Image (cartoon, rainbow, N blue to C red):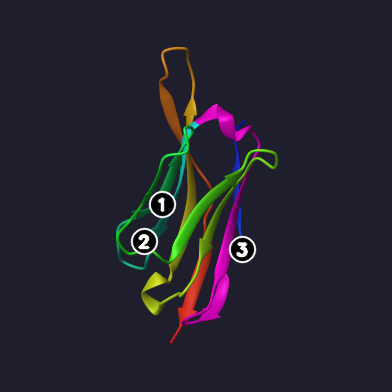
């Protein structure tokens, strides 16, 4: 059973920082890619940042320059450092991973339960 467990959410003032963590029960090398998504109230879930097994990183336009995605293979953990936070960053943040399930490279998506980030103005 593959599990992703997020932590690090909370309430901070605008301009502050938070670091989210996503601990996995598998080696991060077992995933072809990992990512952070977020979902604000009454909005669709959106991609915030992603990192592939090869280390290729992508950010949404809203995250560029403020957020940093990283992973620690030794701790099987994905991180999202969020700086210069804005009220519009308020959302539930979800960890996502693409687990490779066969030698052909097919993958399945795995999701964490989410962690709430609230930014006050």
Q: Mark 1 points at which residue?
A: 49
Q: Is mark 2 on a helix, strand or loop?
A: loop
Sequence-wise, the earlier of marks 3 and 1 is 3
Crowd around label 2: few <14 · some 14–19 · many ≥20 (10 Å): few
Alpha carbon distance from label 1 to label 2: 9 Å
For this rendering, which residue is in front, 43 or 36? 36
Q: What segment carries the magenta color?
A: 9-31
Marking on residue 109? none
Circle 3 or circle 2, nearest the eye: 2
Q: Is 27 displayed left or right of 54 in the figure?
A: right
Residue 109: x and y in percent read 44, 35
Q: What element carries label 3?
A: loop
Q: Give the quadrant of the N terminus.
A: top right
Q: Name the residue under label 2.
A: 64
Measuring 41% from the left and 58% from the top, which residue is drawn there?
38
Residue 40: x and y in percent read 37, 66
Measuring 58% from the left and 45% from the top, which residue is drawn there?
71
Q: Is mark 1 on a helix, strand or loop?
A: strand
Residue 27: x and y in percent read 63, 32
Q: Mark 3 points at which residue?
A: 8
Q: Is 63 displayed left or right of 11 in the figure?
A: left
Sequence-wise, the earlier of marks 1 and 2 is 1
Residue 25: x and y in percent read 66, 36
Sequence-wise, the earlier of marks 3 and 2 is 3
Q: Is 19 displayed left or right of 86 in the figure?
A: right
CB atoms at circles 1 and 2 under 8 Å apart? no
Circle 3 or circle 1, nearest the eye: 1
Alpha carbon distance from label 3 to label 1: 16 Å
Residue 121 in which image quadrant:
bottom left
Measuring 47% from the left and 78% from the top, which residue is drawn there?
119
Circle 1 or circle 2, nearest the eye: 2
């Amino acid at each position: 059973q593959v599990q992703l467990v997020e932590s690090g959410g909370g309430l901070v003032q605008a301009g502050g920082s938070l670091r989210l963590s996503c601990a996995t029960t598998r080696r991060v090398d077992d995933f072809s890619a990992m990512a952070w998504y977020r979902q604000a109230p009454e909005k669709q879930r959106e991609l915030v940042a992603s990192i592939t097994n090869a280390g290729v990183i992508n950010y949404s336009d809203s995250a560029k320059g403020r957020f940093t995605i990283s992973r620690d293979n030794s701790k099987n953990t994905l991180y999202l450092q969020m700086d210069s936070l804005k009220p519009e960053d308020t959302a539930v943040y979800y960890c996502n991973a693409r687990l490779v399930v066969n030698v052909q490279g097919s993958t399945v998506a795995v999701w964490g339960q989410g962690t709430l980030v609230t930014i006050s103005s």
